Image: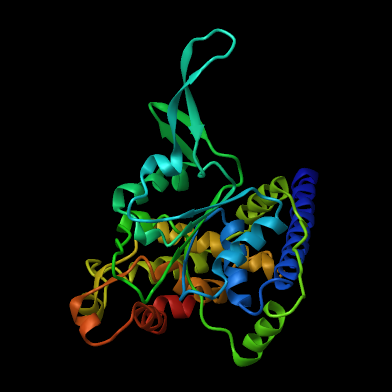
Amino acid sequence: MSATTESLEVDHQERAVRLVDACQKIREQVGRIIVGQDDVIEQLLIAILARGHCLLEGVPGLAKTLMVRSLADTMNLSFRRIQFTPDLMPADITGTDIIQENKETGHRDLVFDKGPIFTQMLLADEINRTPPKTQAALLEAMQEHEVTVGGTTYHLDEPFFVLATQNPIEQEGTYPLPEAQRDRFLFNVVVDYPNRDQEGDIIDRTTSTISTEPQSVVSGSEIIECQGTVRLVPLPEHVKNFVLDLVRSARPRDESTAPWVRELIEWGPGPRACQQLVLASKARALLRGRHHVTRDDVESLALPVLRHRIVPTFNAEAEGVSVDDLIRRLLQELPETSKQLL
């Protein structure tokens, strides 16, 4: 092994240690504001480290907005919130060219007035309450981290994240997200109710004079460095095969698909699911102090990565079979080759 390779490995390990330390500090600061929701916070951190976006689903009152704002504060990132409504227009998100008079020359020029998407952490609140045309205004920003208006392309500040929320119970007046839009989200995170003790703690914190503010513990440049560290984590061949077998087994038109999949799944996940499942697993491995990905990492993140990329059939819905049930069954019935490799 050359000296250069050795130094790179040492540098990678040092960066991994700094990443774990930074994430621990972020959790501590967010924990001063948010009670419980440890799994949700971890999944948000993993998405950020994997340079991905998150779709949060939960009933109102579970502190989703406060959680995202607290994360932005602890990371010293600029934060904007957009309340999605039926009358929201694409220009309300991206910005628009306006005519502005130059006070010195008296001439009128077109000047681009930036919209709220020009931030580092964007909260798209109730994203499914606006029409598809407006929802699509986020597509270029989420994929390319840039915005094109009037033929001019503007780059967004890095790091850039979109965290969107949906109310899973109130569907009146909503517009389902197109599959292309849903696929841009790394995770679909379910935010559940707190337990009894946690809810009691929430009452104590929010109905008294106790007031806490999260402190900034990392910078945007440090987050970008952490994202680079995640991509350096090696992926064992047998784990890559496990990811491929899992994702491909959810495609009803694949030759090796089980008969029950064709009956219960209308559309399965595409190649982006493999890419993002691997990146998320690498981030999870680092957060647990490992420099390699295991099957446990993949299995732990299969639900948030795949649940918004699988479309169940009418038969599945009629039988009350949820997408999460389908994913769990896929994990249990992987091809024997995957089980032997692992």
Across and down, in percent, residue 136 comes to 35, 48
Across and down, in percent, residue 300 comes to 53, 76
Seen in the picture, residue 181 relative to 59 is either above or below; the reply is: above
Number of marks present in the image shown: 0
Q: Nearer the viewer, residue 195 or 269?
A: 195
Q: Nearer the viewer, residue 224 or 331?
A: 224
Residue appearing at x 77%, y 43% in the figure: 4
* Residue at the extreme bottom of the image, as rendered: 196
Residue appearing at x 75%, y 54% in the figure: 218
Across and down, in percent, residue 327 comes to 38, 78
* Residue at the extreme top of the image, as rendered: 105
The image quarter containing residue 261 is: bottom left
Q: How is the image coloured?
A: rainbow
Q: Is residue 262 left or right of residue 100?
A: left
Across and down, in percent, residue 88 comes to 37, 49
Residue appearing at x 34%, y 77% in the figure: 323
Residue appearing at x 44%, y 58% in the figure: 185
Seen in the picture, residue 48 relative to 267 is either above or below; the reply is: above
Q: Is residue 27 left or right of residue 53?
A: right
Q: Nearer the viewer, residue 207 or 311?
A: 207
Q: Is residue 3 left or right of residue 205?
A: right
The image quarter containing residue 321 is: bottom left
